[in-house]
Amino acid sequence: MVAGESGMGKSTLVNSLFLTDLYKDRKLLNAEERINQTVEIIKHTVDIEEKGVKLKLTIVDTPGFGDAVNNNECWKPITDYIDQQFEQYFRDESGLNRKNIQDNRVHCCLYFIPPFGHGLRPVDVEFMKALHEKVNIIPLIAKADCLTPNEIKKLKDRIRDEIEKFGIKVYQFPECDSDEDEEFKQLDKELKECTPFAVIGSNTVVEARGQRVRGRLYPWGIVEVENQSHCDFVKLRNMLIRSHMHDLKDVTCDVHYENYRAQCIQEMTSKLAQDNRMESPIPILPLSTPDVETEKLIKMKDEELKRMQEMLNKMQQQMHDKEQ
Amino acid sequence: MAANEVDVFANEEKRNLELRGHVGFDSLPDQLVSKSVAQGFCFNILCVGETGIGKSTLMNTLFNTTFENEEASHYEKEVQLRPQMYSLQESNVNLKLTVVHTVGFGDQINKEESYKPILEYIDAQFEKYLEEEMKIKRSLANCHDTRIHICLYFIAPNGHSLKSLDLVTMKKLDSKVNIIPVIAKADTVSRSELDKLKIKVMSELVSNGVQIYQFPTEDEAVAEINSSMNTHLPFAVVGSVDDVKVGNKMVKARLYPWGSVQVENENHCDFVKLREMLLRVNMEDLREQTHARHYELYRRCKLEEMGFKDSDPDSQSFSLQETYEAKRKEFLVDLQRKEEEMRQMFVNKVKETEAELKEKEKELHGRFEQLKRMHQDEKKNLEEKRRELEEEMNAFNRRKVAAETLMGQALQGCSQPFKKDKDKKNFFSLPSACSLTSGRNLN
């Protein structure tokens, strides 16, 4: 999933990462149309193959995020979408036929932070706090070609501090095993110190130093996307696709999905426990829709029972009085 | 008689006359210049833009100095304006420069009210000037003119178009102040993207009816350059105060690993154009537009609000003074009426409270009486009961006495006949009970 304000370069980066063009014929809204825009969720699915390895890639785009004048709760459609995917997987998992489950859960969310400010803005903080327990967040500094190396460093430190200050849990790279070789450990350490990645995206190929590279052409120089000293695009690509893709999926399965599942079950059992005062001997299977109806029936029956009991008591009292 | 003559002269048309020699009033402009220079100029700039977009840096670069400005935080609850006044001098021209920054603009999650503080500030400056103008004893020449002469609106270069917040804010401000939009941080847009962005921005502004400041093209001297500049709006600027060595010169630039963006290089950005337009060519026009157009509009609206009119339905022109006096009287009458009303209300309230209190007193009194009566009744009951009890006790005692005497008599009666016969017999048989009773009776 990619999230961030319009014009941050999300589509360009996605195209650069996967070397495809996902966004042909895209319609961009004017400023006045965006005054009251709501956030949409658009899914693009592509099947890509490299050397016999097939990958089904789904990019979830969030146009309209942060564009309206009033951005209260503009992240709600996004959290709803993520929860929906979890719920669907939950149901599939507890269904009868589990062979062909399609995993549509969001494995990673790339959040684009604008480089024009001094750090995180309130809307960034709120968004990340709403999502950090549901999905792996990887914050990126977009359009990094407007910052000098010094400024990049300052901004990264600033953002790291603010992330810690606000208690946002972004995706952490897993620790290296102690038996990995030094080079790997060194790379890993560099990677960790580089977050959040400052990226530049480009789809155009330009001539630089006699080579054809992907970059952006300026009157004062050429920014190469794949040059490590220009930006962190290569690091991001390596991390996302080459080394940590599986780890991202694992963390989504083991941590975020399990959290969701536990929460879901807890809610359901606590609700049922309130309705039935006695314990149900059968463990409650997590089937959502049929359960609601039986719950309702149980509630109704309970109330009837109560009413009858009261009537009985009354009648007994009356008899007692009469006898006296 | 004299009045008539003056009237005749006033109705004549003005005629052109030829001068026969050099008179010397062609030095009027020079006199004006030296006077203005002595007085000093003042210029007020308002910078509107998101936090961190480069407003302070651009100001520093424009005026080649360092204005003290601390970095703003992103977490302000509301937009605030921070005016700062500086005194600059170049050659022998003094400039009182006021730079107003918007702090916290565009940071809030709900930005619907963001434009309000800015609008209020601009109006407040107009209001101040209007007040000064309408004073009886005024010193317009000496007062410090704080009206905003120009608003630089910083657009973030997000590559596609204006943001919705930008559009809304500019629309609210365009009738109050001269707006010049600039594209900030222009070193992030390549040439082709820049052209597209400029066209898009201008078309959006035009289609939404936002009136930005157009450089004047009436004056021949500057018409050409101004009209060409008009096509380059909005200016894409880059600001920097760091000196970088390029070639063999020290220039202001930003140094990147892939090259350096020179601020004063026309190929790199439009900074030079902005400086030309703003400071070197059109500064005076900006001030004049502010005074003649925006301020007059404000003044008209404000005075109409207050009820002033330029002419009566009968086509008699009021003088400002009379209208003012009339208004004042009206207000005073109003005030007095309100005072009376309030006083009446107060008196009524007092009366009501008094009445309430009296009623309460009566109630309490009544209850007290009631309680007293009850108390007395109970006392009476008690007394009666006591009497009854005493009577009963007496009756009981009497009965006791009577019973005992009867018993005594009965015993005596029965003991007498037996006294002759049984004296000897019953001396021992009638035991002590008889003798005791008789003994007791006798006693």
Image (spheres, coloured by chain):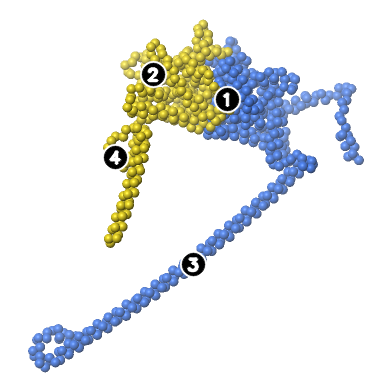
Give, as a three-letter code, the residue at label 1: Asn
Instruction: List x then y, in percent, for residue A160.
Output: 45, 25
Instruction: List x then y, in percent, for residue A105.
Output: 40, 25
Give, as a three-letter code, the residue at label 3: His
Residue shown at 35% from the left, 40% from the top: A297
Q: Nearer the viewer, mark 2 or mark 3?
A: 2
Mark 4 crowd level (few <14, some 14–19, many ≥20, 10 Å Cα)? few
Q: Quadrant of residue B186?
A: top right
Residue shown at 62% from the left, 30% from the top: B171
Q: Are marks 1 and 2 on the same chain?
A: yes
Q: Nearer the viewer, mark 1 or mark 3?
A: 1
Label 1 marks a residue whose chain is A
Under circle 3, the secondary element is helix
Please name the residue that numbered disc 1 is placed on. Answer: A30
The chain that appears blue in the image is: B
Please name the residue that numbered disc 4 is placed on. Answer: A279
Please name the residue that numbered disc 2 is placed on. Answer: A244
Q: CA distance from mark 1 to mark 4?
A: 59 Å
Q: Is residue B32 left or right of residue A163?
A: right
Please name the residue that numbered disc 3 is placed on. Answer: B365
